[in-house]
Amino acid sequence: MKQVAIVGAGAAGCFCAALLKKQAPALSVTVFEAGERPMTKLAVTGGGRCNLTNSFEGIRSLGEAYPRGERVMKRALKAFSQEDTIRWFTAEGVLCVLQEDHCWFPKSQDAMDVVRCLERGMKGADLRLKTPVNSVKELLEHYDYVVVTTGGGPKGLPFLEDLDLDLLPPVPSLFTFNIPDPALKALMGLVVDASVALQGTSYRAEGPLLITDWGLSGPAALKLSSYAARHLSQTAYKGQININWLHANEQTVRERLQETAAANPQKMVSSTHLLQARLWEYLLAKAGIRADIRWAELGSKGLNRLTAILTNDGYPINGKSRFREEFVTCGGVALSNIDLNTLECKQHPGLYFAGEVLDIDAITGGFNLQAAWSTGYVCARSILTSI
């Protein structure tokens, strides 16, 4: 009887184990997990609701969703797509719903339904909790196949070091920004559809931007953190974030202000809200525009200052914060080590990798879990094909 060892009982590892046991019940599958429980991260993802996947609507290229790993995800999604994910979990009793933001969740809004579903699928596998693996190389001497699904490994991947693989240092890739500006933080709770950029770089993102008591969060900030993860790590999470509050170019904003001024010459600028009232008044003050000035009195200099602050409002970044309980890293096992079609290691036949342990990571919105499902599926399929 062939024997399979899976290292790591997270989403990718447990899904791979469930697929193997369902397709080949007689196959010996052992899952090693260093923690006390399986799928602890899965249980809290999506605020405890489990954002299973995304419809990918509005994603123009996979690179938008996967800053690292686009090439392998193109192949993995052909093997097991987001539609396949919903079909699989629905068939296993987890009814799913699609939200307006294109995110798929269990209808119950309870991540534990997903955890229990995978636990049922793994029935017959030998789950060894509180059992860390110190050397994958040693496992390869005792098992026909080894699948490594340990996640991003923020402290590194020491159990792979004796395999002579190309490993990329893992760094955080999904976080929010600490902004040491009391006036901005006083606006906490406001959400604005905006675009953001890192000054001096080509990194850009757009979407809802949330002002918090520590700085900036929301999809726009989280996407920017993902795109610029390694750059920000190298700068010790210092720099400047520039906000375009109206998510429009300078000329468009200038024309809109001119039209507003022409239509409301005697109205006070502060009472003609182009944004939420508190934010609008804050930005007027930051632009040096008096609260009692009228549009007819604004003049070209005032118009220029207001256009600048609305389209390129800069704030210093002073560190990062984790996004809720979730922790995503970029880095890990370089994709040059693996066959992109099978996810088998080129140097070590029988060794496979799935999930975030690979140099694959995504923006928020269910894309990281989809990578776990797709790559876990490819590994299971590769093993089943070779038996």
Image (spheres, rainbow, N blue to C red):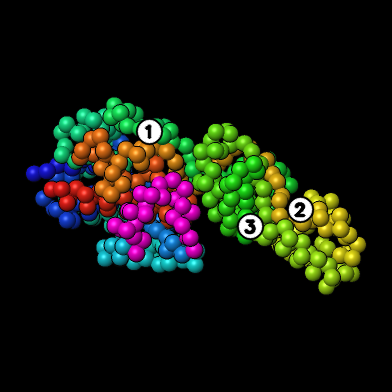
Compared with residue 163, is residue 62 higher up or lower down, i.e. above or below? Answer: below
**Viewer-proximal residue among 290 and 249:** 249
Q: Is residue 377 shown in magenta?
A: no
**Mark earlier in primary sequence (3, 1):** 1
Task: Indicate the secondary structure of the residue bearing disc 3.
Answer: strand
Residue drawn at the location 58% of the way across and 34% of the way down: 235
Count residues near mark 1 (Cα–Cα under 10 Å), then give few for <14, some for 14-19, many for 20+.
many
Is residue 188 shown left or right of residue 77?
Answer: right
Count residues near mark 2 (Cα–Cα under 10 Å), then give few for <14, some for 14-19, many for 20+.
some
Magenta: predominant secondary structure element?
Answer: helix
Q: Which residue is mark 2?
A: 308
Residue 302 pos. (x, y %): 85, 56
Tell me the distance, in whole angstroms, between the alpha carbons under discs 3 and 1.
36 Å
Residue drawn at the location 49% of the way across and 43% of the way down: 173
**Mark earlier in primary sequence (1, 2):** 1
Residue drawn at the location 62% of the way across and 55% of the way down: 195
**Mark earlier in primary sequence (3, 2):** 3
Residue 81 pos. (x, y %): 34, 60
Whether residue 275 is visible to the viewer of this picture, yes or no, is yes
Q: Amino acid at mark 1?
A: Leu
Query: Marks 2 and 3: in contact by CB < 8 Å?
Result: no
Query: Marks 1 and 3: in contact by CB < 8 Å?
Result: no
Residue extending farthest to the top is: 162
Label number found at residue 167: 1
Q: Nearer the viewer, mark 3 or mark 2?
A: 2
Q: Which residue is mark 3?
A: 194
Number of numbered tags placed on the structure image: 3
Task: Indicate the secondary structure of the residue bearing disc 2.
Answer: helix
Task: Please provide the residue range marked out in magenta.
Answer: 58-83
Dividing the picture into quadrants, the one containing residue 94 is bottom left
